[in-house]
Amino acid sequence: MNTTHHLTEKGQAIVFLVVGLVVFLGFVGLAIDGGAVYADRRNAQNVADASSLAGGATVALYLENNFVYYNGWNCNSAAIQESIAAGQSAAISRSTANGFTLDGDSSDLNGVTVTCGEENNDMYLDRYIDVTVDISSTTQTSFAQLFMPEGSLTNHVSAVTRIRPRQPLAFGYAIVALNPGSCSGHSNGLTIHGTADIIVNGGGAYTNGCLNGDGQPVLDVTNGSIGYGGEFEPGNAVWNPTPHDVENPIPPDLYEIPEPDCTGRWFNNLNGTLEPGLYCINNNLMINGKDTLIGNGVTIYVPNGYVHIDGNATVQLSAPAASPDPAPAIPGVLFYFPPSNHNELSINGNPESYFQGTILAAGSEVDVEGNSVIDGYRTQVIGWDVEIGGTANTNVLFNSNNVYSKPTTLELFR
Protein backbone atom coordinates (compact mmCIF):
# COMPACT_ATOMS: atom_id res chain seq x y z
CA MET A 1 0.00 0.00 0.00
CA ASN A 2 1.36 3.36 -0.96
CA THR A 3 1.29 6.32 1.49
CA THR A 4 1.18 9.80 0.07
CA HIS A 5 3.07 12.55 1.97
CA HIS A 6 2.25 16.21 1.44
CA LEU A 7 5.22 18.50 1.82
CA THR A 8 2.96 21.31 3.10
CA GLU A 9 2.30 19.39 6.38
CA LYS A 10 5.92 19.27 7.45
CA GLY A 11 6.80 21.42 10.51
CA GLN A 12 3.26 22.00 11.84
CA ALA A 13 3.99 20.21 15.13
CA ILE A 14 6.89 22.54 15.78
CA VAL A 15 4.58 25.58 15.47
CA PHE A 16 2.12 24.15 17.99
CA LEU A 17 5.00 23.18 20.27
CA VAL A 18 6.39 26.70 20.23
CA VAL A 19 2.98 28.28 20.87
CA GLY A 20 2.28 25.82 23.67
CA LEU A 21 5.69 26.46 25.21
CA VAL A 22 5.06 30.22 25.24
CA VAL A 23 1.68 29.73 26.90
CA PHE A 24 3.20 27.32 29.40
CA LEU A 25 6.01 29.73 30.25
CA GLY A 26 3.42 32.48 30.62
CA PHE A 27 1.53 30.45 33.23
CA VAL A 28 4.78 29.65 35.01
CA GLY A 29 5.70 33.33 35.04
CA LEU A 30 2.25 34.28 36.30
CA ALA A 31 2.51 31.72 39.11
CA ILE A 32 5.98 32.89 40.16
CA ASP A 33 5.26 36.63 39.96
CA GLY A 34 1.76 36.25 41.39
CA GLY A 35 3.10 34.22 44.31
CA ALA A 36 5.76 36.84 45.00
CA VAL A 37 3.22 39.67 44.88
CA TYR A 38 0.84 37.78 47.17
CA ALA A 39 3.61 36.97 49.66
CA ASP A 40 4.71 40.62 49.74
CA ARG A 41 1.12 41.77 50.19
CA ARG A 42 0.56 39.34 53.05
CA ASN A 43 3.74 40.50 54.75
CA ALA A 44 2.79 44.15 54.33
CA GLN A 45 -0.71 43.47 55.71
CA ASN A 46 0.73 41.68 58.73
CA VAL A 47 3.02 44.63 59.43
CA ALA A 48 0.15 47.10 58.97
CA ASP A 49 -2.05 45.12 61.39
CA ALA A 50 0.73 44.81 63.97
CA SER A 51 1.64 48.50 63.72
CA SER A 52 -1.97 49.65 63.97
CA LEU A 53 -2.58 47.43 67.02
CA ALA A 54 0.64 48.65 68.65
CA GLY A 55 -0.47 52.24 68.21
CA GLY A 56 -3.98 51.39 69.41
CA ALA A 57 -2.70 49.66 72.53
CA THR A 58 -0.60 52.72 73.37
CA VAL A 59 -3.61 55.01 72.94
CA ALA A 60 -5.83 52.73 75.07
CA LEU A 61 -3.28 52.54 77.86
CA TYR A 62 -2.83 56.30 77.80
CA LEU A 63 -6.60 56.89 78.03
CA GLU A 64 -6.87 54.48 80.97
CA ASN A 65 -3.91 55.91 82.86
CA ASN A 66 -5.14 59.47 82.41
CA PHE A 67 -8.79 58.69 83.25
CA VAL A 68 -10.15 59.82 79.88
CA TYR A 69 -13.77 58.61 79.93
CA TYR A 70 -16.68 58.75 77.54
CA ASN A 71 -18.54 61.52 79.34
CA GLY A 72 -15.52 63.83 79.43
CA TRP A 73 -14.63 63.24 75.78
CA ASN A 74 -13.11 66.21 73.98
CA CYS A 75 -10.99 65.60 70.89
CA ASN A 76 -9.18 68.88 71.42
CA SER A 77 -8.20 68.17 75.02
CA ALA A 78 -4.53 67.90 75.93
CA ALA A 79 -4.91 64.31 77.14
CA ILE A 80 -6.45 63.05 73.90
CA GLN A 81 -3.96 64.96 71.75
CA GLU A 82 -1.09 63.47 73.76
CA SER A 83 -2.56 59.97 73.36
CA ILE A 84 -2.80 60.54 69.60
CA ALA A 85 0.86 61.56 69.41
CA ALA A 86 1.94 58.59 71.52
CA GLY A 87 -0.10 56.16 69.41
CA GLN A 88 1.32 57.48 66.16
CA SER A 89 4.87 57.19 67.45
CA ALA A 90 4.29 53.60 68.63
CA ALA A 91 2.81 52.55 65.29
CA ILE A 92 5.72 54.09 63.35
CA SER A 93 8.26 52.39 65.62
CA ARG A 94 6.60 48.99 65.15
CA SER A 95 6.55 49.35 61.36
CA THR A 96 10.23 50.36 61.36
CA ALA A 97 11.12 47.29 63.43
CA ASN A 98 9.39 45.19 60.77
CA GLY A 99 11.22 46.70 57.83
CA PHE A 100 8.87 49.47 56.66
CA THR A 101 9.69 53.16 57.03
CA LEU A 102 6.54 55.18 57.66
CA ASP A 103 5.87 58.75 58.73
CA GLY A 104 2.91 60.81 59.84
CA ASP A 105 1.79 61.62 56.28
CA SER A 106 -0.40 59.03 54.54
CA SER A 107 -0.91 61.03 51.34
CA ASP A 108 1.71 58.82 49.65
CA LEU A 109 0.05 55.67 51.08
CA ASN A 110 3.03 55.15 53.38
CA GLY A 111 2.20 56.59 56.75
CA VAL A 112 0.34 56.52 60.06
CA THR A 113 -2.60 58.77 60.83
CA VAL A 114 -4.39 58.90 64.18
CA THR A 115 -7.76 60.64 64.32
CA CYS A 116 -10.30 61.39 67.05
CA GLY A 117 -13.96 61.35 66.12
CA GLU A 118 -17.56 60.60 67.00
CA GLU A 119 -20.54 59.21 65.10
CA ASN A 120 -24.23 59.37 65.95
CA ASN A 121 -25.61 55.88 65.24
CA ASP A 122 -29.20 56.53 66.41
CA MET A 123 -28.84 54.98 69.88
CA TYR A 124 -25.88 56.90 71.16
CA LEU A 125 -22.85 58.95 70.20
CA ASP A 126 -19.97 56.61 69.36
CA ARG A 127 -16.71 58.22 70.47
CA TYR A 128 -13.38 56.78 69.37
CA ILE A 129 -9.79 57.19 68.18
CA ASP A 130 -8.70 55.46 64.97
CA VAL A 131 -5.08 54.44 64.30
CA THR A 132 -4.75 54.01 60.52
CA VAL A 133 -1.65 52.48 58.94
CA ASP A 134 -1.13 52.63 55.16
CA ILE A 135 1.70 50.68 53.52
CA SER A 136 2.67 50.48 49.86
CA SER A 137 5.19 47.85 48.84
CA THR A 138 6.88 47.18 45.49
CA THR A 139 7.53 43.67 44.22
CA GLN A 140 10.21 43.12 41.58
CA THR A 141 8.95 40.64 39.01
CA SER A 142 10.74 38.01 36.93
CA PHE A 143 8.43 37.69 33.98
CA ALA A 144 5.99 40.59 34.16
CA GLN A 145 8.76 42.89 33.02
CA LEU A 146 8.46 41.30 29.60
CA PHE A 147 5.07 42.98 29.32
CA MET A 148 5.41 45.92 31.72
CA PRO A 149 8.12 48.54 31.19
CA GLU A 150 8.67 49.20 34.90
CA GLY A 151 9.02 45.51 35.65
CA SER A 152 7.44 45.76 39.13
CA LEU A 153 4.05 45.56 40.83
CA THR A 154 2.81 47.65 43.78
CA ASN A 155 0.66 46.54 46.70
CA HIS A 156 -1.28 48.90 48.95
CA VAL A 157 -2.65 47.68 52.27
CA SER A 158 -4.36 49.42 55.17
CA ALA A 159 -5.26 48.59 58.77
CA VAL A 160 -7.41 50.54 61.24
CA THR A 161 -7.56 49.95 64.99
CA ARG A 162 -10.46 51.67 66.76
CA ILE A 163 -10.16 52.58 70.45
CA ARG A 164 -13.22 53.44 72.50
CA PRO A 165 -12.87 55.11 75.92
CA ARG A 166 -14.10 53.72 79.20
CA GLN A 167 -17.88 54.17 79.26
CA PRO A 168 -20.93 53.24 81.36
CA LEU A 169 -23.02 50.14 80.66
CA ALA A 170 -25.93 50.17 78.20
CA PHE A 171 -24.79 53.27 76.30
CA GLY A 172 -24.95 55.31 79.51
CA TYR A 173 -28.75 55.38 79.94
CA ALA A 174 -29.73 56.00 83.56
CA ILE A 175 -32.79 53.69 83.47
CA VAL A 176 -32.76 50.61 81.23
CA ALA A 177 -35.24 47.74 80.67
CA LEU A 178 -33.84 44.88 78.58
CA ASN A 179 -37.06 42.93 77.94
CA PRO A 180 -37.70 43.10 74.15
CA GLY A 181 -41.35 42.01 74.44
CA SER A 182 -44.19 44.06 73.05
CA CYS A 183 -46.77 45.96 75.09
CA SER A 184 -49.47 43.51 73.98
CA GLY A 185 -50.41 41.46 77.02
CA HIS A 186 -48.23 43.86 79.04
CA SER A 187 -44.98 41.96 79.06
CA ASN A 188 -43.64 44.92 81.06
CA GLY A 189 -40.41 46.48 79.78
CA LEU A 190 -40.12 49.99 81.24
CA THR A 191 -43.15 51.21 83.19
CA ILE A 192 -43.53 54.55 84.94
CA HIS A 193 -46.35 54.58 87.46
CA GLY A 194 -47.93 56.46 90.33
CA THR A 195 -48.86 60.11 90.62
CA ALA A 196 -45.54 61.83 91.34
CA ASP A 197 -42.66 63.14 89.26
CA ILE A 198 -39.80 60.95 88.06
CA ILE A 199 -36.88 63.29 87.46
CA VAL A 200 -33.86 61.92 85.61
CA ASN A 201 -30.83 64.17 85.32
CA GLY A 202 -28.36 62.72 82.82
CA GLY A 203 -28.39 59.52 80.79
CA GLY A 204 -32.11 59.30 80.10
CA ALA A 205 -34.34 56.22 79.91
CA TYR A 206 -34.55 53.34 77.44
CA THR A 207 -36.28 50.00 76.92
CA ASN A 208 -35.57 47.28 74.36
CA GLY A 209 -39.32 46.61 74.18
CA CYS A 210 -42.40 48.19 75.71
CA LEU A 211 -42.53 51.70 77.16
CA ASN A 212 -45.74 52.45 79.02
CA GLY A 213 -47.31 54.74 81.58
CA ASP A 214 -49.58 53.63 84.42
CA GLY A 215 -51.43 56.24 86.47
CA GLN A 216 -50.57 59.92 86.06
CA PRO A 217 -46.81 60.19 86.60
CA VAL A 218 -44.44 62.66 84.96
CA LEU A 219 -41.15 61.48 83.47
CA ASP A 220 -38.91 64.52 83.11
CA VAL A 221 -35.46 63.90 81.59
CA THR A 222 -32.73 66.50 81.34
CA ASN A 223 -29.38 65.95 79.63
CA GLY A 224 -30.70 62.77 78.05
CA SER A 225 -33.48 61.20 75.99
CA ILE A 226 -36.31 58.66 76.26
CA GLY A 227 -36.09 55.78 73.79
CA TYR A 228 -37.85 52.50 73.11
CA GLY A 229 -37.12 49.60 70.79
CA GLY A 230 -40.64 48.10 70.70
CA GLU A 231 -43.96 49.80 71.40
CA PHE A 232 -45.02 52.95 73.20
CA GLU A 233 -48.20 53.17 75.27
CA PRO A 234 -48.15 56.63 76.87
CA GLY A 235 -51.29 56.21 79.00
CA ASN A 236 -52.01 59.32 81.06
CA ALA A 237 -48.36 59.94 81.86
CA VAL A 238 -46.49 63.09 80.88
CA TRP A 239 -43.29 62.48 78.92
CA ASN A 240 -40.56 65.07 78.53
CA PRO A 241 -38.93 64.93 76.05
CA THR A 242 -41.16 62.98 73.67
CA PRO A 243 -40.02 59.34 73.49
CA HIS A 244 -38.51 58.23 70.20
CA ASP A 245 -38.26 54.87 68.47
CA VAL A 246 -34.77 53.32 68.37
CA GLU A 247 -34.00 50.67 65.78
CA ASN A 248 -31.22 48.67 67.45
CA PRO A 249 -31.59 46.98 70.86
CA ILE A 250 -28.91 47.07 73.54
CA PRO A 251 -26.78 43.93 73.03
CA PRO A 252 -25.65 41.72 75.95
CA ASP A 253 -21.99 42.69 75.72
CA LEU A 254 -22.95 46.23 76.77
CA TYR A 255 -24.37 45.19 80.13
CA GLU A 256 -22.40 42.06 81.05
CA ILE A 257 -19.76 42.30 83.77
CA PRO A 258 -17.37 39.76 85.34
CA GLU A 259 -18.69 37.53 88.11
CA PRO A 260 -17.19 38.40 91.52
CA ASP A 261 -15.17 35.99 93.63
CA CYS A 262 -17.35 35.16 96.65
CA THR A 263 -14.83 32.90 98.37
CA GLY A 264 -15.17 33.54 102.11
CA ARG A 265 -17.65 36.37 101.54
CA TRP A 266 -21.06 34.69 101.90
CA PHE A 267 -23.66 36.21 104.24
CA ASN A 268 -27.16 35.20 105.29
CA ASN A 269 -28.25 38.75 106.02
CA LEU A 270 -26.93 42.30 106.27
CA ASN A 271 -27.61 44.96 108.88
CA GLY A 272 -25.97 47.86 110.65
CA THR A 273 -22.79 49.41 109.29
CA LEU A 274 -20.81 47.53 106.63
CA GLU A 275 -17.09 47.63 106.08
CA PRO A 276 -16.03 48.35 102.46
CA GLY A 277 -15.94 45.24 100.29
CA LEU A 278 -17.96 42.50 98.60
CA TYR A 279 -21.02 40.94 100.24
CA CYS A 280 -22.45 37.78 98.63
CA ILE A 281 -25.97 36.87 99.79
CA ASN A 282 -26.79 33.16 99.66
CA ASN A 283 -30.58 33.60 99.97
CA ASN A 284 -32.96 36.59 100.18
CA LEU A 285 -32.15 40.02 101.57
CA MET A 286 -34.91 41.91 103.37
CA ILE A 287 -34.40 45.32 105.01
CA ASN A 288 -37.61 46.20 106.88
CA GLY A 289 -39.17 48.59 109.35
CA LYS A 290 -36.64 50.28 111.57
CA ASP A 291 -33.66 48.42 110.10
CA THR A 292 -30.56 50.43 109.27
CA LEU A 293 -28.05 49.49 106.60
CA ILE A 294 -25.11 51.81 105.96
CA GLY A 295 -22.10 51.02 103.81
CA ASN A 296 -19.55 52.98 101.83
CA GLY A 297 -17.58 51.18 99.10
CA VAL A 298 -19.69 48.02 98.99
CA THR A 299 -20.92 45.65 96.28
CA ILE A 300 -23.90 43.40 97.17
CA TYR A 301 -24.08 40.28 94.99
CA VAL A 302 -27.28 38.21 94.96
CA PRO A 303 -26.97 35.13 92.70
CA ASN A 304 -30.29 33.42 93.53
CA GLY A 305 -32.60 35.32 95.89
CA TYR A 306 -34.50 38.59 95.93
CA VAL A 307 -33.90 41.96 97.63
CA HIS A 308 -36.68 43.96 99.29
CA ILE A 309 -35.89 47.30 100.93
CA ASP A 310 -38.81 48.75 102.87
CA GLY A 311 -39.60 52.46 102.80
CA ASN A 312 -39.39 52.71 106.58
CA ALA A 313 -35.80 51.45 106.74
CA THR A 314 -32.80 53.76 106.63
CA VAL A 315 -30.45 52.61 103.90
CA GLN A 316 -27.37 54.56 102.83
CA LEU A 317 -25.20 52.63 100.40
CA SER A 318 -22.52 53.55 97.89
CA ALA A 319 -20.48 51.42 95.52
CA PRO A 320 -16.67 51.29 95.54
CA ALA A 321 -14.76 53.86 93.57
CA ALA A 322 -12.53 52.73 90.73
CA SER A 323 -9.35 53.59 92.62
CA PRO A 324 -7.83 52.25 94.74
CA ASP A 325 -8.69 48.76 93.53
CA PRO A 326 -11.42 47.37 95.83
CA ALA A 327 -11.32 43.79 94.48
CA PRO A 328 -13.14 41.51 94.88
CA ALA A 329 -15.80 44.21 95.18
CA ILE A 330 -16.73 45.63 91.78
CA PRO A 331 -15.97 49.32 91.15
CA GLY A 332 -19.15 51.29 90.56
CA VAL A 333 -21.52 48.34 91.19
CA LEU A 334 -23.86 48.58 94.18
CA PHE A 335 -26.29 45.67 93.57
CA TYR A 336 -25.57 42.86 91.14
CA PHE A 337 -28.00 40.11 90.17
CA PRO A 338 -26.45 37.84 87.51
CA PRO A 339 -28.59 37.29 84.37
CA SER A 340 -29.54 33.83 85.67
CA ASN A 341 -31.33 35.35 88.67
CA HIS A 342 -34.98 36.01 87.73
CA ASN A 343 -36.21 37.30 91.08
CA GLU A 344 -37.10 40.85 92.13
CA LEU A 345 -35.02 43.75 93.36
CA SER A 346 -37.35 46.21 95.07
CA ILE A 347 -36.22 49.51 96.62
CA ASN A 348 -38.63 51.82 98.41
CA GLY A 349 -36.67 54.86 99.47
CA ASN A 350 -37.31 57.55 102.05
CA PRO A 351 -35.83 61.02 102.71
CA GLU A 352 -33.07 59.51 104.87
CA SER A 353 -31.89 57.02 102.24
CA TYR A 354 -29.55 57.23 99.30
CA PHE A 355 -28.10 54.76 96.81
CA GLN A 356 -25.00 55.37 94.72
CA GLY A 357 -23.70 53.02 92.04
CA THR A 358 -25.01 50.72 89.32
CA ILE A 359 -28.02 48.54 90.13
CA LEU A 360 -27.61 45.69 87.65
CA ALA A 361 -30.21 42.92 87.46
CA ALA A 362 -30.29 41.93 83.79
CA GLY A 363 -32.65 38.96 84.28
CA SER A 364 -34.85 40.36 87.05
CA GLU A 365 -37.66 42.76 87.74
CA VAL A 366 -36.50 46.01 89.32
CA ASP A 367 -38.93 48.24 91.18
CA VAL A 368 -37.74 51.65 92.39
CA GLU A 369 -40.01 53.88 94.48
CA GLY A 370 -39.50 57.56 95.24
CA ASN A 371 -37.77 59.15 98.21
CA SER A 372 -38.26 62.89 97.51
CA VAL A 373 -34.52 63.60 97.90
CA ILE A 374 -32.95 65.42 94.95
CA ASP A 375 -29.96 63.09 94.82
CA GLY A 376 -31.37 60.05 96.61
CA TYR A 377 -30.67 57.77 93.66
CA ARG A 378 -27.21 58.57 92.32
CA THR A 379 -27.29 55.51 90.20
CA GLN A 380 -27.90 53.62 86.98
CA VAL A 381 -30.75 51.08 87.02
CA ILE A 382 -30.61 48.15 84.59
CA GLY A 383 -33.16 45.33 84.76
CA TRP A 384 -35.11 42.92 82.59
CA ASP A 385 -38.31 44.75 83.53
CA VAL A 386 -38.16 48.08 85.34
CA GLU A 387 -40.93 49.90 87.21
CA ILE A 388 -40.21 53.32 88.60
CA GLY A 389 -42.42 55.89 90.32
CA GLY A 390 -44.86 56.01 93.22
CA THR A 391 -46.54 58.69 95.28
CA ALA A 392 -43.33 60.52 96.20
CA ASN A 393 -40.97 62.10 93.70
CA THR A 394 -38.23 59.82 92.40
CA ASN A 395 -34.99 61.61 91.58
CA VAL A 396 -32.31 59.79 89.60
CA LEU A 397 -29.03 61.65 89.26
CA PHE A 398 -26.78 59.94 86.74
CA ASN A 399 -23.05 60.59 86.84
CA SER A 400 -20.66 58.29 85.01
CA ASN A 401 -18.11 58.72 87.81
CA ASN A 402 -20.48 57.01 90.27
CA VAL A 403 -21.36 53.91 88.21
CA TYR A 404 -19.64 50.94 86.63
CA SER A 405 -17.66 51.62 83.46
CA LYS A 406 -16.58 49.14 80.84
CA PRO A 407 -12.80 49.37 80.37
CA THR A 408 -11.25 51.06 77.37
CA THR A 409 -11.52 48.74 74.37
CA LEU A 410 -9.72 48.36 71.06
CA GLU A 411 -10.48 46.33 67.96
CA LEU A 412 -8.89 45.83 64.57
CA PHE A 413 -11.64 47.73 62.84
CA ARG A 414 -10.70 46.98 59.22
Image (cartoon, helix red, strand yellow):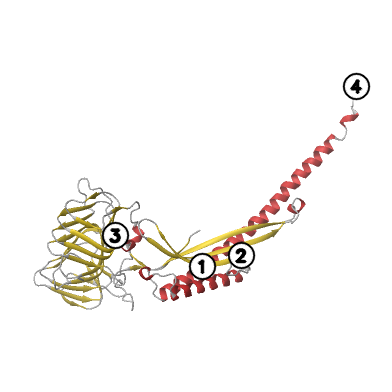
Residue 39 in which image quadrant: bottom right
Where residue 375 sits: x, y (%)? 21, 71
Tag 3 secondary structure: strand
Gap between marks 1 and 2 measured at Cα: 14 Å
Gap between marks 3 and 4 measured at Cα: 102 Å
Mark 1 and mark 3 in contact (Cβ < 8 Å)? no
Crowd class of label 2 (few under 14; some 14 to 19; many from 20; radius 10 Å): many
Which residue lies under the disc numbered 4? 2
Gap between marks 3 and 1 measured at Cα: 31 Å
Is any part of residue 255 visible from this angle? no
Tag 4 secondary structure: loop
When the figure is inspected, residue 369 is found, relative to residue 323, above or below; the finding is above
Circle 3 or circle 4, nearest the eye:
3
Tag 2 secondary structure: loop
Amino acid marked by disc 4: Asn
Where residue 30 sits: x, y (%)? 70, 50
Amino acid marked by disc 3: Ser
Numbered label attached to residue 242:
none
Which residue lies under the disc numbered 2? 110
Upstream in the sequence, badge 3 or badge 1?
1
Residue at the image point whose x is 48% and y is 70% from the top: 57
Amino acid marked by disc 2: Asn
Numbered label attached to residue 114:
1
Crowd class of label 3 (few under 14; some 14 to 19; many from 20; radius 10 Å): many
Upstream in the sequence, badge 2 or badge 3?
2
Numbered label attached to residue 225:
3
